[in-house]
């Protein structure tokens, strides 16, 4: 595996690695940062982001959101949708039109603070796992890792991931650090 991005956050990091293959390579991401929120609080806010992102103070609404609230209880097999507004790198104040992808919940445990999903019909097959790890009764670690497939040597996909992941997870970290109350979300200028 080759590390193609090792980006520092204020209290953590994002690592993107490439697993080459002849037919389908995999891009693995691992984002983590420490928070001053209990694991159960952080986990519920992230889950709320998947259910109805407009009601989560931890969710970076500038870049990702639920297009409609998810109804019913969460359980393995439950399907949900996420909309993405990716910045236009050549003009950071503009975003591309929102695209929506479908996902399926493959593992879910409030007790263990785990939310795992896979893409359904996603252009790049894959998925991810979110975990809120307990550091102390009042602190936790945000952990989000996953992998997506792409055609071998697709530099456009590599470049997109290398630019988008820092923007996305810096926004997550900022939202989480701001905590409950009015959601303060500002667009980061992309260099």
Image: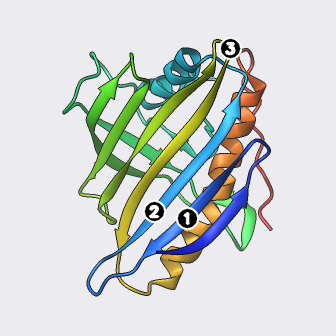
Which residue is the extreme one toward the front?
Answer: 136
The answer to which of marks 3 and 2 sits earlier in the sequence is: 2
Q: Which residue corresponds to the image point at 45% horizontal and 25% vertical from the top-left?
A: 47
Compared to 127, does 16 lie above or below?
below
Q: Nearer the viewer, residue 187 or 106?
A: 106
Q: Nearer the viewer, mark 3 or mark 1?
A: 3
- Image spot of residue 86 (x, y percent): 58, 58
- Image spot of residue 40 (x, y percent): 53, 16
The answer to which of marks 3 and 1 sits earlier in the sequence is: 1
Labels 3 & 1 near each other (Cβ < 8 A): no
Residue picked out by circle 1:
16
Labels 2 & 1 near each other (Cβ < 8 A): yes
Residue 161 in sight in this render: yes
Could you say whether the residue bearing mark 3 is in a helix, strand or loop?
loop
The answer to which of marks 2 and 1 sits earlier in the sequence is: 1
The image quarter containing residue 177 is top right
Disc 2 versus disc 1: distance between alpha carbons? Answer: 6 Å
Q: Nearer the viewer, mark 3 or mark 2?
A: 3
Disc assigned to residue 84: none
Q: Residues within 10 Å of mark 1 (few under 14, many from 20)?
A: many
Q: Nearer the viewer, residue 32 or 123?
A: 32
Residue picked out by circle 3:
138
Residue picked out by circle 2:
28
Could you say whether the residue bearing mark 1 is in a helix, strand or loop?
strand
């Amino acid at each position: 595996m080759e590390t193609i991005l090792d980006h520092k956050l204020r209290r953590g990091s994002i690592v993107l690695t490439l697993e080459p293959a002849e037919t389908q390579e995999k891009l693995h991401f691992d984002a983590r940062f420490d928070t001053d929120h209990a694991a159960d609080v952080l986990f519920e806010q992230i889950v709320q982001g998947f259910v109805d992102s407009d009601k989560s103070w931890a969710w970076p609404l500038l870049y990702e959101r639920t297009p409609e609230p998810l109804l019913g209880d969460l359980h393995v097999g439950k399907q949900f949708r996420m909309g993405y507004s990716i910045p236009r790198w050549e003009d950071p104040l503009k975003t591309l039109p929102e695209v929506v992808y479908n996902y399926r919940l493959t593992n879910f445990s409030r007790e263990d603070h785990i939310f795992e999903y896979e893409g359904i019909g996603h252009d790049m097959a894959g998925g991810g796992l979110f975990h809120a790890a307990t550091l102390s009764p009042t602190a936790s670690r945000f952990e989000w890792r996953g992998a997506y497939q792409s055609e071998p040597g697709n530099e456009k996909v590599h470049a997109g991931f290398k630019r988008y992941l820092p923007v996305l997870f810096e926004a997550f970290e900022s939202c989480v650090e701001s905590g409950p109350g009015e959601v303060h979300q500002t667009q980061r200028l992309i260099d």
